[in-house]
Structures are given as C-alpha cells and as structure tokens.
Image: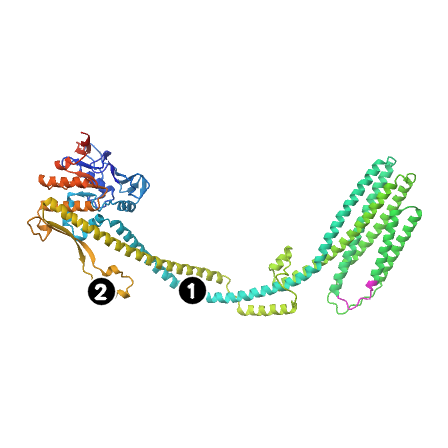
C-alpha cells in the first residue's frame, strides 16, 4: 500500500483544487517560507482524522477554511481526499484504490467519506490502524513533533511507540472489549435488578396459578366425565338408529333400480303405442288421463302412508306424555283390523289392475264397501273406548291426532273417488280396445309388468316411509338429549357437535362395556362440589403467570449469557494484554537497537538507548487479590508508565536530555524517528522540515539515512535542504500568488 494522490480544495491556502501525484520513491516539496508547503502535511494529517487544531496550527475548526484575500472571497467549505493504492489488501476493503475524504463546511458541519460513501471517524481510524497508518502516530512528522519526542513526558511518548511497535490496533480492540465489558456489567446489574423485582411477584402468581391448575384439573375431570356420560347416551341412541340408515340406503338403491326399470318399460310402451295406428285421439287422451289418475292414486297412497306414520308417532308421544294407568282399547285388535283392511285393499287394487269386465267392477265396489264399513267399525270402537286417567299432571293435546285422522279419512275418500274414476276410464278403454285386444296383447303385457314393478316400487317406498318415521323418532330423542345437556352443563363441545350434526361415535375412545350411567352421574355431582369449594379465580392469572415466568426465564437466561460474555471478554482482554506485552517488548527492543545504530551514524559514535519506565504497584490495605474477582494477573505486575530516552554523544556523559544543544536534540529526535520507521515502516512517511536546524554536514548524514528509509517506505519530504532535494525523484514547488493562494509546480527529476 502507498499514497497515490492527494486532492486539496479550499483547505487553508489551497483555495483552488490542487492535485499532487506521488511515486513509490522519494518526493520533495520545496518553496519559500510562507508559500503554504507545510499546509500539504497539515492536509494529510487532517484527512487522517486529526482533531487537535493546535497540531494543525490553528485555534478553531474554521481555521482550516480558506479565509479569503483582497481579490478572492473566502471558501464555504474545505475538502481533502487521500488516494491509497490497496492492491495488497492491507486495508480490509474489497477495493484496489481506497479514497479517504474529509469535508468541512463553514456552518460547522463535517463529514467523512470512504470511496465516496459516508462513514464515521471511528471507521476511518479503525481502517488506518489495521494498515499501520494513524493521525496520532508517525506518518506525518514535522519539526515540532520531532522535538516533542524529546520534550514529551514518558507517558506521552508511549502513544508514538505503541504505534511504532504495531500494538495500537490490539489496544483499540482491547479498549473496545473493555467498553463492551463495562456495558455488559451494567446490563448484568440491570438484569439482576429486574430479576429481584420480578421474583416476589412470580412467587405470588405461582401460588395462585397452582390453585388455578387444581381448579382446572377438577374442571377438566368434570368435563371428561360429562363427555363420557353424554357420549355414552348418544352412542347408545346412535347405535339404535344406525341400522335404519343402512336400511334406508338399501331401499334407496332398490327404489332407484326399480324406477330405472319402470322408465325402460314406459319407453317400450311408448314405442308400442307409436307403432299402432289404430289408437284414436280419444284413446290417447284416455290413456293420458288414466296414467295421471294412476300417479295421483299412488301419490295419495303415499300421503296416506305418511299420514298413518304421523298418527302413529303422535300416539306414541301421547303415550309418553300422559302415561295412563290403563288403556281399555286393545291395540292388538286394532292392528289386526287394520291388517285385514290392508289385505282387502291389496285385493281391491289387483282387481283394479285387471278390470276385465263389469263383474270385476262390481267386485271392486263390493270390496270398497267392505273396506269402508270395516274402517267405520274401527273408528266407532275407538270412539266408544273408555280411558281412565289417574294422577295426570300433563294433558296431551290430541288435536293434531284428530286433524291427522281427518286428513287420513279425506285421503281415503279421495282414493276411492279416484279409483272409481279410474275404473270408469278402464271401462271406456275396454270398449275402445274390444276389437283390437289381440293386437294390444303385447301392450297389456308391458302394462302388467309395469304395474308389477310399480307395486314393488310402492312397497319399497312404503318401507322407506316407515324408516323415515323411525328416523323422526330419533330426532325427537336427540332433541330431548340436547335439552338435557343444556340443563346440565350448557353449551359445550358435545352439544355443539350434536347440533351441527358433526358428532362422531367415540366408542373407541371410551370403553362402555362396564359403564355405569348412575355411577357416572354421582361422580359428576362430587366434582361439581369440589369445583365450587375452590371458588372463583381470575382467568387471567395463568396468562399473567406464564408471561411473568417467561420474562423471568428470559432474564435469567440473559443473565447467564451476560455472565458468560463478561467472562469471555475478560479472557479476550487478558489475551490481548499478553499479546500486546509480547509484541511491544520485542519491537521496543529492536527500536532501541536501531536508535543506537542511527545515533552512532549521525554523531559518529556515542551511545543511546530506549528504556521502559514502570510505575510502582502497591496493593491497597484490606484488598486481597484472591477475594477480588475483578483483579487479573496483569494487576499483579508493574504497570508501564512511559518511555525514557537515554542519549550520550561521543565524549560526553549526559544525565538528562535537557543538557543537549538544539542541534544535538534535533539529531537525537531524527535518530529516534528513523529507528521507529526501520522497525515498523508505515505505508508512507511525511517529513515536514525536520532538517531545518541541521548544518550541511549533518544534512548529508540524514540524507543518506533518508535513502535507506526510502527503500522500506514511501517518503515525502518538505524541505529547504539541497541534500534532501537530491534524493527526490519528483520535486513539487509551492508558490503563492498575489491572491494569497498556493499553487503547485511539479518537476520529475528522474525524467531529466
């Protein structure tokens, strides 16, 4: 890495944009006093993050802005950009060229940029520290700084030597770790305070939560037992009616199959009828009417069956409601009578289908009269029956039964009327088909088959109606169960599923082989008593307890993590201390040896060395290290307080640097600077008139050393000395015009 280019705009005397390109070797900047050449060194220090205005030869930050002249107005901002070649990736950025920029505006605002992206000062300092460049180190050295090495206190010299030995970046990491450790300790204390605050409340909530859990367990047991009981009742009821569902499905299949066959027969009848040209318009109309009558009769027969089923349901409900002591009506007798009527009705219907002659019609009329008489006898016997009621609390409203019976009677009359009309139409058809009976034989055979199928279909429908009646009874019993659940426990999961018709048989979940319904009810009663004894508990207690416990556990985990982090940071700091000590001692020894070497070269002999000054460490009373966890092994060692410089020119015995003359002090400081550079060469080194106090002879010695140093690092020299100029490959001349603005004239001596 090396310094490629420097751009200055509005900084001190460089009002206009000025660009200086620097080669790898030695570059010399010359010019008369007051031309502004030292402002180049100040610009480099400023862009590297220098915050001390005294070091920049000013009093306030605005002093770095061009203040203006008689012919040039003052600048509103100052900007300096440093272009660094980073192909060796010494700066940890994925750029071959790194541009560091610092800007200052007259209103006091400032900004730092890295490759034209905004950055913080700490970011720039950290990058430079990793690459061996620092505004507090020795990359830019002026005459005052060289002398300040000697006049500085041992502690102040430590800053320079920390940079020189390359431990500054580790010290930055150490300081960051110390800051993190202090922050971690503060956070740990805050977490401890929060834990102490939460713990009493958590204990109180824990006791309440325990009661809530006990109450919840009883409630859960109660719900479980209720679920078992009502599941048992429902399962039993459901099993009783499951068979009806299966039978209903089978009947549905039979009805669909026979309906399909009837449709086929009807299609054949239609085909046969279309092939016959002997049918008159009157016959076709009669056929339509007789078919309509047949469907009407079937529909009334269906309604009659449904009405009879409804009557049966209502009578059973009446029995359940009124519960009479005895009923004098012989239901078996009534049943036998009704069965006989059904048998007579079947025979009547068969005669209707045949309708061969007038004798058949007379037979049908006789059978109808017989059915009517039997039904009137049954009704008369029922009306004359005596029902004795004892201790009746509920009187069932039998108006519905009467209405249904009336409806049944009306339907029966309608059937008889339509059957009579049906017979009349058959007579007329017989007369029309008398001459063509043989031709219509096939047609009647199909008709017969159709009727047979229709009869079978009607029987299936009757059976289906009976099943529907049973299912209606199931609905009644289900409603009773729902009312019981509401009375006992109100709305719950079982009730909701029954109401939504999504309840499934849970017989696999509960084993009901030895289930005692009464015992279950007794258990539910006991659980209710226990539930009431615990009393009411805020339902939000468990939620608050869980949240508080979760927070307490989180803070406890945070406390453990912070303790581990604190311990880890302590180890890191100890490791950095050890690393810093090892690197510092090794490099410091080398710098001391180089200092002695350059001192002898410059002075032609003598003796010089550097030494570390330690502070006395004393344990305070009543502060035993073993009982103090904050103390480390480093606390038991002597602390480095600073750096001492010992220098004795040839033939002199010097006890203090103050005895040295001005020239000797300058040469001694130069020897120290070159020793530092030799140990850990920075990417570039700016020497700002450090040779001003040297005579020609000593300047030649320093120039030779400069040549040696230039082989290790890029060298930029601001000088008046001709010997220094001879070492440069590029020469920049700085002048100042009448507008007090510095200008640059460049000359590449290597090309001359």
Left/right placement of residue 538 relative to residue 484 reads left
What segment is highlighted magenta in the picture? 323-332
Residue 735 located within the stretch drawn in magenta: no
> How far apart, in angstroms, are the residues tagged by discs 2 and 1?
42 Å
Q: Main secondary structure of the magenta part?
A: loop
Element class at badge 2: loop
User: In the displayed structure, would residue 205 be above or below residue 739?
Assistant: below
Q: Position of residue 171 (x, y in %)?
A: 26, 52
Decide if residue 747 is in sight here. no
Q: Position of residue 450 (x, y in %)?
A: 82, 45
Q: Nearer the viewer, residue 223 or 171?
A: 171
Residue at point 73% right, 53% down?
A: 248
Element class at badge 1: helix
* Label located before the other in sequence (2 or 1): 1
Residue 324 located within the stretch drawn in magenta: yes
Question: Mark 1 = which residue?
Answer: 201
Visual colour scheme:
rainbow
Question: Mark 2 = which residue?
Answer: 620
Left/right placement of residue 90 relative to residue 543 reads left
Residue at point 17% right, 33% down?
A: 735
Q: Position of residue 681 (x, y in %)?
A: 21, 44
Residue at point 66% right, 63% down?
A: 233
């Amino acid at each position: 890495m090396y310094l490629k280019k420097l751009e200055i705009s509005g900084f001190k005397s460089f009002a206009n944009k000025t660009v200086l390109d620097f080669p790898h070797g030695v570059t010399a900047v010359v010019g008369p006093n007051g031309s502004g050449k030292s402002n180049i060194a100040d610009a480099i220090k400023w862009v590297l993050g220098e915050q001390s205005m005294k070091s920049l030869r000013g009093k306030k930050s605005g002093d770095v802005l061009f203040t203006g002249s008689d012919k040039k107005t003052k600048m509103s901002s100052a900007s300096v950009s440093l272009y660094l070649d980073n192909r060796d990736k010494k700066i940890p950025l994925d750029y071959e060229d790194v541009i560091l920029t610092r800007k200052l505006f007259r209103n006091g605002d400032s900004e730092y940029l890295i490759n034209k992206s905004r950055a913080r000062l700490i970011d720039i300092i950290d990058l430079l520290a990793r690459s061996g460049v620092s505004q507090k180190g020795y990359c830019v050295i002026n005459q005052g700084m060289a002398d300040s090495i000697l006049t500085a206190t041992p502690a102040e010299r430590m800053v320079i030597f920390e940079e020189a030995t390359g431990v500054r970046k580790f010290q930055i990491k150490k300081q960051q770790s110390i800051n993190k450790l202090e922050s971690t300790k503060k956070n740990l204390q805050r977490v401890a305070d929060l834990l102490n605050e939460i713990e009493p409340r958590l204990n109180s909530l824990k006791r309440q939560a325990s009661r809530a859990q006990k109450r919840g367990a009883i409630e859960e047991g109660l719900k479980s037992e209720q679920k078992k009981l009502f599941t048992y009742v429902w399962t039993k009821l459901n099993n009783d009616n499951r068979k009806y569902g299966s039978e209903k499905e089978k009947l549905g299949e039979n009805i669909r199959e026979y309906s399909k066959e009837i449709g086929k027969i009807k299609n054949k009848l239609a085909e046969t009828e279309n092939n016959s040209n002997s049918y008159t318009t009157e016959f076709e109309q009669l056929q339509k009417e007789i078919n309509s009558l047949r469907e009407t009769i079937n529909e009334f027969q269906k309604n009659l069956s449904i009405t009879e089923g409804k009557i049966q349901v209502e009578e059973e409900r009446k029995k359940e409601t009124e519960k009479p002591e005895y009923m004098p009506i012989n239901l078996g007798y009534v049943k036998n009578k009704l069965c006989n009527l059904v048998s007579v009705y079947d025979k009547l219907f068969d005669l209707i289908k045949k309708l061969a002659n007038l004798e058949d019609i007379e037979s049908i009329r006789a059978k109808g009269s017989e059915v009517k008489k039997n039904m009137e006898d049954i009704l008369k016997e029922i009306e004359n029956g005596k029902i004795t009621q004892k201790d009746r609390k509920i009187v069932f409203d039998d108006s519905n039964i009467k209405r249904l019976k009336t409806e049944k009677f009306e339907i029966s009359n309608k059937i008889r009327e339509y059957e009579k009309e049906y017979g009349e139409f058959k007579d007329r058809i017989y007369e029309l088909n008398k001459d063509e009976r043989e031709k219509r034989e096939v047609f009647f055979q199909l008709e017969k088959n159709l009727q047979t199928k229709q009869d079978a279909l009607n029987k299936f429908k009757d059976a289906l109606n009976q099943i529907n009646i049973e299912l209606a009874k199931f609905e009644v019993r289900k409603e009773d169960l729902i009312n019981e659940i509401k009375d006992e426990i109100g709305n719950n999961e079982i009730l909701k599923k029954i109401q939504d018709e999504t309840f499934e048989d849970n017989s696999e979940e509960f084993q009901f082989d030895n289930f005692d319904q009464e015992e279950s009810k007794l258990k539910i009663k006991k659980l209710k008593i226990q539930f009431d004894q615990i009393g009411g508990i805020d339902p939000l207690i468990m939620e608050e307890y869980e949240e508080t416990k979760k927070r307490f556990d989180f803070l406890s985990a945070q406390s453990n993590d912070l303790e581990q982090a604190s311990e880890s940071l302590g180890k890191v700091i100890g490791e950095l201390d050890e690393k810093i000590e090892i690197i510092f001692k090794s490099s410091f020894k080398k710098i001391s040896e180089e200092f002695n070497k350059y001192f002898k070269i410059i002075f032609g002999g003598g003796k010089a060395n550097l030494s570390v000054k330690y502070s006395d460490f004393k344990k305070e009373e009543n502060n035993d290290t073993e009982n103090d966890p904050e103390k480390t092994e480093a606390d038991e060692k002597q602390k480095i307080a600073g750096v001492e410089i010992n220098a004795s020119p040839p033939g002199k015995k010097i006890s203090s640097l103050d005895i040295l003359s001005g020239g000797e002090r300058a040469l001694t400081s130069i020897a120290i600077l070159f020793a530092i550079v030799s140990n850990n060469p920075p990417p570039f080194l700016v020497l700002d008139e450090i040779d001003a106090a040297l005579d020609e002879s000593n300047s030649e010695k320093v120039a030779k050393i400069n040549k040696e140093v230039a082989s290790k690092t890029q060298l930029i020299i601001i000088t008046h000395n001709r010997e220094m100029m001879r070492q440069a490959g590029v020469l920049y001349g700085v002048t100042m015009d009448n507008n007090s603005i510095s200008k640059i004239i460049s000359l590449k001596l290597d090309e001359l």
